[in-house]
Amino acid sequence: MKKIKTFILKDRSLSSLIWLWGIFGTILLFLLVDALATIPLIKKIPYLEDWIYLLVPTYYLFVFYLGFFTDITPSFKSILHTLMHFIGQMAVLIIFMSFWGVFAIFGGTDYQANTYSMNQETPDVFAEISGMDYPEGAELIHTSSSRWGPN
């Protein structure tokens, strides 16, 4: 545990801070939060998923703290470096979230079309959603259902 603490709080240059905590840390944080937030047990516990998402701002505030003290004396230069580091982290996070968003939309495989049970349930579902009665003598041509989200 002492070695991990020494590794995390070690004095580093700004460029290594950006690569280690800004790029790789953001990727690992993104994967960790995504994996934890999709566990079914966690979704059943009230508010736990919200606390998991709080890891993101906590991580960024921690990295913001580490980046501010790369110079010995806080100055305009250290504030500017820290701000640029923070903007870079946000850019990396937005890039990964956009790739994940595309995957989430098109990555789902739970698609069903024209199954017997769907054809039987369609008049009831139509009446429930639209608030109108299913027309007499109407011909059902196609039914489909899809679940958007990662596999």
Image (spheres, rainbow, N blue to C red):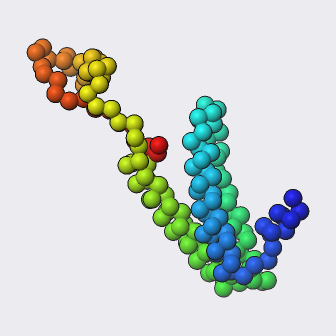
As drawn, 87 above or below 145: below
- Residue 36 visible in the picture: yes
Q: In the visual, does 58 lie left or right of 100?
A: right
Looking at the image, which residue is at 12% across and 19% down?
138
Quarter the N terminus occupies = bottom right
Instruction: Give the number of callouts.
Output: 0
- Residue 47 visible in the picture: no
Find the residue positioned furthest to the top: 136
As drawn, 20 above or below 1: below
As drawn, 37 above or below 124: below
**Rendering quarter of residue 50:** top right
**Viewer-nearest residue: 96 or 150:** 150
**Rendering quarter of residue 79:** bottom right
Q: Position of residue 22 (x, y in %)?
A: 62, 70
Looking at the image, which residue is at 66% across and 53% down?
55
Q: In the visual, does 12 lie left or right of 51?
A: right
**Rendering quarter of residue 143:** top left
Q: Position of residue 41 (x, y in %)?
A: 63, 33
Looking at the image, which residue is at 65% across and 45% down?
51
Looking at the image, which residue is at 40% across and 41% down?
109
**Viewer-nearest residue: 5 or 88:** 5
Find the residue positioned furthest to the left: 137
Q: Position of residue 120 (x, y in %)?
A: 27, 17
Q: Position of residue 4 (x, y in %)?
A: 82, 63
